[in-house]
Image: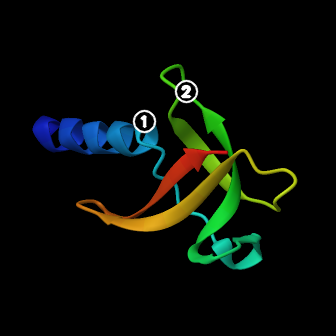
Amino acid sequence: MKSRIAALAAAVMFLVSAGVVTASPATADPVPGSPNQFYASCAVDLLGSPVGCLETDEVHATHICQYVVTAFGLGLDCIQR
């Protein structure tokens, strides 16, 4: 039981450190010429990785994000603007 909890905690920490946060791009501004990417405002951890992203408009965006399929499910891949 403890190993399952530890594995779950490790997976959650990996997702947070990798910047994998679900967001709905339906209300975000799309990136011109890239239908899969959208603008987002993200907090950044000490290593420079985005840790929390919210969809936003182009003016307030700090990152450009897109959905990616990972071993843990659907996640976000974000790059700084």
Q: Residue at x 69, y 55 (%)?
A: 40
Q: Residue at x 84, y 50 (%)?
A: 60
User: Dot 1 lies on which element?
Assistant: helix
Q: Residue 31 location, x and y as percent?
A: 68, 69
Look at the picture and state if 68 lies above or below 79.
below
- Distance from disc 1 to disc 2, alpha carbons, whole Å, reads 8 Å
Residue 1 - label: none
> Which of 6 and 30 lies nearest the eye of the viewer?
30
1 and 2 marks in contact (CB < 8 Å): yes
Q: Residue 76 location, x and y as percent?
A: 48, 58
Look at the picture and state if 44 lies above or below 60.
above
Q: Residue at x 77, y 70 (%)?
A: 29
Q: Residue at x 70, y 60 (%)?
A: 39
> Which of 30 and 13 lies nearest the eye of the viewer?
30
Residue 64, quarter of picture? bottom right
Q: Which residue is mark 1?
A: 17
Q: Residue 38 location, x and y as percent?
A: 65, 67
Please give left or right for residue 55 compared with residue 58 in the image. Answer: left
Amino acid identity at mark 2: Asp
Please give left or right for residue 54 compared with residue 65 in the image. Answer: right
Mark 1, other Cα within 10 Å: few <14 / some 14–19 / many ≥20? some
Please give left or right for residue 81 compared with residue 74 in the image. Answer: right
Q: Which residue is mark 2?
A: 45
Amino acid identity at mark 1: Ser
Mark 2, other Cα within 10 Å: few <14 / some 14–19 / many ≥20? some
User: Dot 2 lies on which element?
Assistant: loop
Hey, which residue is sitting farthest front in the picture? Answer: 33
Which quarter of the rendered picture does the C terminus lie within?
top right
Which quarter of the rendered picture does the N terminus lie within?
top left
Hey, which residue is sitting farthest right in the picture? Answer: 59
